[in-house]
Amino acid sequence: MDLSGIMKTYADQIGGQFTQYDQSQSIIIIPVSGGRFQTVLGTIKKNELYNRELLTLNSKVCAPNSSIDYKMLLEQTAFFNYCRFVINQNYLQVEAVASLDNLSESTIKEMLQEVANLADQYEMKLTGSDVH
C-alpha cells in the first residue's frame, strides 16, 4: 500500500498540503469549512496480535480536561463512519483505524476527510477556537 502516494494525490486534489516522514508515516493538511485547515497524521503499523498491517489516521482536538463531557463524545461515535475519540500523547484526538487488507484508495480518502472534519468540528465545539 502506497499511503504516501494516496495522501499526496488527495492533497493535490483538495488544495491541501502533504509531507512524508518515511514510508510508514505522512501528514496531510486538509481544508475544512470556514477556511480552516486540519492536520491529519497517517501511519502504517504492524499489529502483532492479529499479524496484519493497520492504517491509523489521527488528528488532534484539544488537551484533555475535566470540563469535557466524555460520555457525550463516546455517544457521538455511534454516528461516525470510521472514527472514534482517543486520548493519545496527552491530546484528545479523532482516530480512524483499518486493516490494509482490501482497503481501497477511495475509502482512505473518505477516512482522511472524516478525521479532519470531525477533529475540526469538535475542536471548535470544545475549545471555541482553531488550535490545530
Image: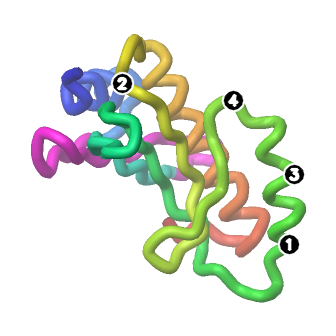
Q: Which mark is residue 81?
A: 4
State the residue at coordinates (70%, 52%). 121
- Residue 40 shown left or right of residue 64 in the figure: left
Q: Amino acid at mark 1?
A: Asp
Mark 4 or mark 2, which has the lower sequence index? 4
Which SS does the magenta portion mostly show? strand
Measured from the top left, where is residue 82 in percent x and y? 62, 33
Disc 3 designates what residue? 75
Mark 1 or mark 2, which has the lower sequence index? 1
Q: Amino acid at mark 2?
A: Leu
Cα–Cα gap, marks 4 and 1: 21 Å
State the residue at coordinates (20%, 23%). 2
Q: Is residue 74 above or below residue 70?
A: above
Secondary structure at badge 4 equals: loop
Which stretch did the figure color magenta?
A: 18-36
What colour scheme has been applied to the protein in the rendered image? rainbow
Disc 2 designates what residue? 100
Mark 1 or mark 3, which has the lower sequence index? 1
Mark 3 or mark 4, which has the lower sequence index? 3
Q: Between 74 and 27, which is closer to the camera in this rendering?
A: 74
Mark 3 or mark 2, which has the lower sequence index? 3
Measured from the top left, where is residue 36 in percent x and y? 54, 52
Measured from the top left, where is residue 21 in percent x and y? 14, 51
Q: Amino acid at mark 4?
A: Asn
Cα–Cα gap, marks 4 and 2: 17 Å
Q: Amino acid at mark 3?
A: Glu
Secondary structure at badge 2 equals: loop
